[in-house]
Image (spheres, rainbow, N blue to C red):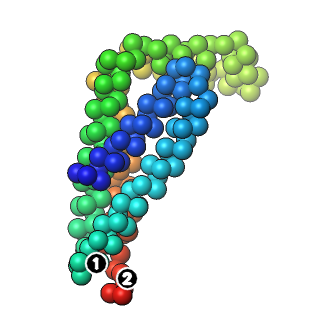
Amino acid sequence: MEYGTFIGLTWGGMFLTYVEGISYNNGLLMLLCFMLGGVALVLPFVLAFRLNRKMALAGEHLSYFQGLFFAFSMFMYGCLLNGLIVFAYFQFLDNGLLMEQLNAMLTQPEMVKMYEQMGMGDQHAQMMSILAEADALSAWEKTLMIFNNNFFISMFLSVIVAFVASWQRNSKS
């Protein structure tokens, strides 16, 4: 649970800096989002290595399936905490600002002209219809979509993180 909290807070911070950076056209928040993205990529491996080291100091080690269970539960706690943060944002803070800003960016004459020049006018129209559909979703539905995305990413990462958590260390470590 403890490690999942760190994962969830990192993902939540990344989400909040991303949406606020887009909503208010703030480049520093977008830069912070990219930095948090790097932390979010490395953090599960650091936490698995930390657990592995603590187990080695105690003279124990995890099997691969124990490491897999550790990684999966860590990511699931992270998904739940991030889901709470995302839901709170869409329910109480957003008020449609994110979708308005995305719509404003994509309907700028320069942007429309650029898509047409690249021969992607149909794709731009598709993107606008998808944005309109996403705008019609409730806060719960938007949160559920993001939660599902995080869940599937976590399933794949759990397999890799489990190797780090179950790695056999030398007894001299």
> For mark 2, does the 10 Å Cα neighbourhood hold few (<14), some (14 to 19), or many (20 or more) residues?
few
Residue 167 place in picture, x, y as percent: 35, 75
The amino acid beneath tag 2 is Ser
Viewer-closest of 97 and 27 = 27
Asked whether, in this view, residue 118 is left or right of residue 169, the answer is right
Disc sitting over residue 173 in the figure: 2
The amino acid beneath tag 1 is Leu
Viewer-closest of 58 and 70 = 58
The quadrant the C terminus occupies is bottom left
Asked whether, in this view, residue 95 is left or right of residue 56, the answer is right
Q: Residue at x 58, y 37 (%)?
A: 31
Give the distance between the C-alpha atoms of the residues marked 1 and 2, in whole angstroms.
8 Å
Q: Which of the 4 quarters of the picture holds residue 113?
A: top right
Label 1 belongs to which residue? 57
Local SS, label 2 = loop
Local SS, label 1 = helix
Q: Residue at x 34, y 48 (%)?
A: 6
Residue 153 place in picture, x, y as percent: 39, 48
Whether residue 134 is visible here, answered yes or no, is: yes
Whether residue 102 is visible here, answered yes or no, is: no
Mark earlier in primary sequence (1, 2): 1
Q: Is residue 53 above or below residue 97?
A: below
Residue found farthest to the right: 117
